[in-house]
Image: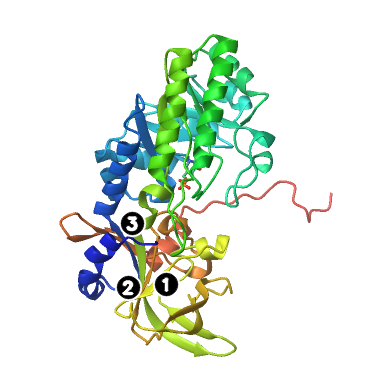
């Protein structure tokens, strides 16, 4: 099921008032739902020695949401300087942050080490000498290559740009040790939006096996493994939700076996984005135009700049026509935005109840990789974000973009060079 019944029960009775006050379009997030998912994760993994979720900031980079996640005791997975700065701004420090970048710059390494540092997760062996100062605790991202298959969003590990190869992995740890690293972690991220929990169990098994091999080889021990994000959510009404309890139970069992064999067990880290916030957000839009040509089109007051997933991945997002939930479905329509790209569609040939101009449409599951992915192509601006608190109050947590924001990068100090040797010069 997309969007939970409890989210509906909280939102629908007050939606008209929210729309009247704030105006559409907007994303709205449900604090109660986010907290409930966080608690479910902690409960599911309560039997491993230590569990921590590092929320993937890129999924929903809003300080008000990050504060909720920090309040639950979780950390943050960052991969850029702005994400680091935002996490630190709300008080995350040191081991609260895992920095998982790729194709990393020296500037990024410096930002990662600043302000109390973070857990540095290196994507490649050649980055070891480029880290300005090797921290005591270091982690590598492992790419198992042909040993595993990926899924559709993230692709086949052999073709993926991420991570240290199987052959290079022990060498990478040795190089980090030579530069002074004394504590170690092992990370991987192989899937995205995966609903089959067994994949994560296999990933755990794979990482624990590598921990044994490398520990043996180098005489080191590991503080943690990080099994990455990628837990799926049911976007389609007939998708079966990920079986969290079965996944946690089987992963816990792998840890138990590891402890039995090795007399210790590493901590278990995870860095889910989508699973934490995806189902707890919706995009609310208004129908503004009808068009009847070769197909029927419903034009709404938002476009790809609010939600890119349908256009990029052909992703399905369930749509509810507010107040018409129990009405019969009409002939198929395309629900479209105004961008001059024919893939600017929230739904393609979808059967929905009869939509009148002014109707409110609720586009489900936009709480992760929704607003954050938006762009400004075609001069399209991003919408506002709202947060529904546990007490039912609704708060603006990001304003909509303005034309001034769009023009902001055109305001700068004049700068110009006349190259001494230009292409058109004769001699
Ligand atoms: C994007 C990303 C995540 C989060 O992915 P979800 O599918 O939202 O869980 C976690 N880790 C890394 C390294 C990522 O790039």
The reply to whether residue 98 is visible in this rendering is: no
Q: Which mark is residue 131?
A: none
Q: Where is the N terminus found, in terms of image quarters? A: bottom left
Q: Identify the residue at horizontal 48%, vertical 43% (top origin).
A: 197
Neighbour class for label 1 at 10 Å: few (<14), some, many (≥20)? many
Label pair 1/2, CB-CB below 8 angstroms: yes
- Secondary structure under tag 2 reads loop
Structural distance between the alpha carbons of marks 3 and 1: 19 Å
Between 362 and 201, the residue placed more toward the observer is 201
Q: Identify the residue at horizontal 28%, vertical 73% (top origin).
A: 23
Residue that carries the numbered disc 2 in the rendered image: 24
- Secondary structure under tag 1 reads loop
Neighbour class for label 3 at 10 Å: few (<14), some, many (≥20)? many
Instruction: Count the marks.
Output: 3
Q: Residue 108 appears at what percent x and percent y? A: 49, 34
Q: Is residue 158 above or below residue 349?
A: above
- Secondary structure under tag 3 reads helix
Residue that carries the numbered disc 3 in the rendered image: 280
Q: Which mark is residue 302?
A: 1
């Amino acid at each position: 099921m997309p969007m939970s019944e409890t989210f509906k029960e909280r939102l629908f009775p007050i939606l008209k008032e929210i729309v009247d006050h704030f105006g559409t379009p907007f994303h709205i997030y449900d604090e109660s739902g986010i907290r409930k998912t966080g608690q479910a994760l902690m409960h599911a993994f309560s039997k491993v020695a230590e569990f921590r979720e590092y929320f993937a900031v890129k999924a929903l980079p809003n300080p008000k949401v990050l504060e909720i996640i920090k309040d639950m005791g979780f950390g943050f997975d960052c991969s850029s300087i702005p994400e680091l700065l935002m996490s630190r701004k709300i008080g995350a420090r040191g081991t609260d942050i895992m920095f998982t970048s790729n194709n990393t710059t020296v500037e990024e390494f410096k930002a990662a080490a600043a302000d109390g540092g973070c857990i540095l997760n290196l994507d490649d062996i050649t980055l070891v000498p480029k880290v300005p100062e090797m921290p005591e605790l270091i982690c590598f991202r492992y790419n198992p290559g042909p040993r595993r298959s990926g899924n559709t969003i993230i692709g086949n590990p052999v073709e993926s740009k991420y991570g240290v190869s199987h052959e290079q992995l022990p060498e990478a740890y040795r190089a980090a040790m030579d530069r002074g690293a004394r504590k170690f972690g092992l990370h991987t991220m192989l899937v995205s939006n995966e609903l089959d929990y067994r994949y994560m169990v296999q990933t755990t098994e794979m990482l624990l096996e590598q921990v044994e091999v490398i520990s043996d080889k180098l005489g080191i021990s590991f503080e943690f493994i990080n099994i990455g994000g990628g837990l799926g959510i049911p976007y389609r009404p007939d998708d079966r939700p990920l079986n969290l309890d079965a996944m946690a139970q089987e992963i816990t069992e792998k840890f138990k076996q590891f402890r039995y064999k090795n007399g210790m067990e590493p901590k278990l880290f995870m860095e889910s984005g989508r699973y934490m916030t995806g189902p707890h957000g919706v995009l609310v839009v208004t129908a503004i135009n009808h068009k009847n040509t070769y197909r029927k089109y419903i034009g709404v007051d938002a476009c790809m700049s609010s939600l890119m997933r349908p256009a990029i991945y052909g992703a399905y997002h369930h749509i509810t026509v507010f107040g018409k939930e129990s009405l019969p479905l009409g002939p198929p329509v395309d629900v479209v935005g105004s961008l001059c790209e024919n893939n600017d569609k929230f739904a393609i040939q979808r059967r929905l109840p009869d939509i009148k101009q002014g109707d409110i449409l609720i586009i489900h599951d936009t709480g992760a990789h929704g607003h954050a992915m938006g762009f400004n192509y075609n001069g399209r601006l991003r919408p506002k974000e709202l947060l529904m608190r546990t007490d039912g109050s609704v708060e603006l947590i990001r304003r909509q973009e303005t034309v001034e924001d769009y023009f902001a990068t055109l305001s700068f100090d004049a700068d110009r060079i006349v190259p001494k040797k230009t292409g058109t010069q004769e001699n």
